[in-house]
Amino acid sequence: MADEVSNSSSRPLLPASASATALLLLSTFVAVSGSYVFGCAVGFSSPAQSGILTDLGLTLSEYSLFGSISTIGAMVGAVLSGKLADLLGRKGAMWFAELFNLVGWLAIALSKNALWLDIGRLSTGFGVGLLSYVVPVYIAEITPKNLRGAFTAANQLMICCGVSVMFLIGNVITWRLLALTGTIPCLIQLVGLFFVPESPRWLAKVGKWDGSEASLLRLRGRNADIFEEAAEIREYTRSLEQLKESGLMDLFQRKYAHSLIVGVGLMVLQQFGGVNAIAYYASAIFLSAGFSDRVGTTAMVIVQVPVTVLGTLLMDKSGRRPLLLVSVAGTFLGCFIIGLSFLLQDLKLWDSSPVLALVGVLIFGGSFSLGMGGIPWVIMSEIFPINVKGVAGSMVTVVNWLGSWIITYSFNFLAQWSSAGTFFMFAAVCGVTIIFIVKLVPETKGRTLEEIQESMLSFN
């Protein structure tokens, strides 16, 4: 490695953050193939419902178990995600996750009864739970600071694309073929991981200094000046070597309080702002409001994908905090409008309230996709020091999946109580989120991971 670096000194060196290299783009694409699998898993159950109920003779309660059991698998995967990513490396953890996803999709596609459906769904849930942590962490650790936000936000973009594609092609192909399409991105990632480098920061963490510098040089390009970035990684990692390997209870030390509050708080507020109530039950919401569910869900797809692309492009230009604030203000407005439409319908004051519900859902979906969908995962991957990143990432991811389960399970009961009241409560949570972001969430744009983590520790 020393010879390689010295030989490169005879060539003009470029700043390491000058541009995205072909290998960096490939590595990110391979990583977010896992995010696409995530989206496929979320989007599969809705278009497949009628076909599975008819072909396998499942009851509605059996299908409800099939749909929700993935969340249980994801929580188990999330619990283990940090430890596995630290033990196997970021690449190894993604490879391990895709084995479960591949087996799961094949079990679903070939299933003859409810048992194999549930086994397959549980397996894909476990794989997705792992990927939901390791993908944004890997991307954050391989990208230069001036590109990190946009590249990490590609995670949310591919989740959105996976959901949307499942919704659209699920209307024209059988549920078994739909499940088989879920294996395609699994295979892309499994093969692609052989051609991309391991995270230089993880390699430094496990003491593979030459491997860390070689990985960094490959990612930045042979003519890039990596000395400053490599030195910063080395210095920061060595300072953390003095600390013992952290367990769950170590995470509750005062010096990690700010990072933990921000990471967990964003995930709780993301879920309790109502996103999965709308994502999982959009059709029921439209029908309850008196609007066509097919027109409504198609409109959601049309709005969300381009807005997610816009959010990805703006991530490193506007900064995390401004984009988050605009996004959450939009989700507040969307929930308020949906609640207002149900209130007007209950009071029989306005015949066009179904159109108002559509407008509210589209505002919410577009606004959420702009920032609140992806930025919490970006920030989670940035704020924790590498000695606690595994256990902290596991906790944050488990909290996210637990919140998802609570909202998806309770929404129908809340809607029976009061649809208007439910969405007004979601709007109130969005209002609290604005205050939380203003008071506690740091701006991480244009800073190295080491700079961000040092500032989070000094905050306390």
Image: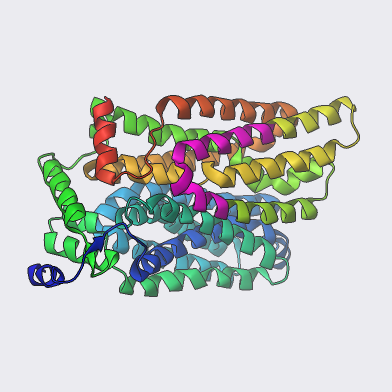
Does residue 380 appear left or right of residue 294 in this picture?
A: left
Q: Is residue 253 above or below residue 19?
A: above
Q: Residue drawn 65% across and 36% down?
A: 411
Asked which quadrant contains residue 52, the reply is bottom right
Magenta span covers which residues?
A: 309-335
* Dominant SS type (magenta): helix
Q: Can residue 65 be spotted in the picture? A: yes
Question: Magenta includes 316?
Answer: yes
Colour basis: rainbow
Location of residue 275 in the rendering, given as x and y in whole percent from the top left corner: 60, 41
Q: Is residue 51 left or right of residue 268?
A: right
Query: Between 307 and 115, which is closer to the camera in this rendering?
Result: 307
- Residue at the (69%, 51%) spot, across then down: 300
Where's residue 233, x and y in %? 19, 50
Q: In the figure, residue 58 lies in which quadrant?
A: bottom right
Residue 291's spot in the image, x, y percent? 83, 45
Measuring from the top left, give residue 183's x and y in whole percent. Answer: 51, 71
Horizontally, residue 88 falls left or right of residue 154, namely: left
User: Residue at 43% across / 48% down in the picture?
Assistant: 316
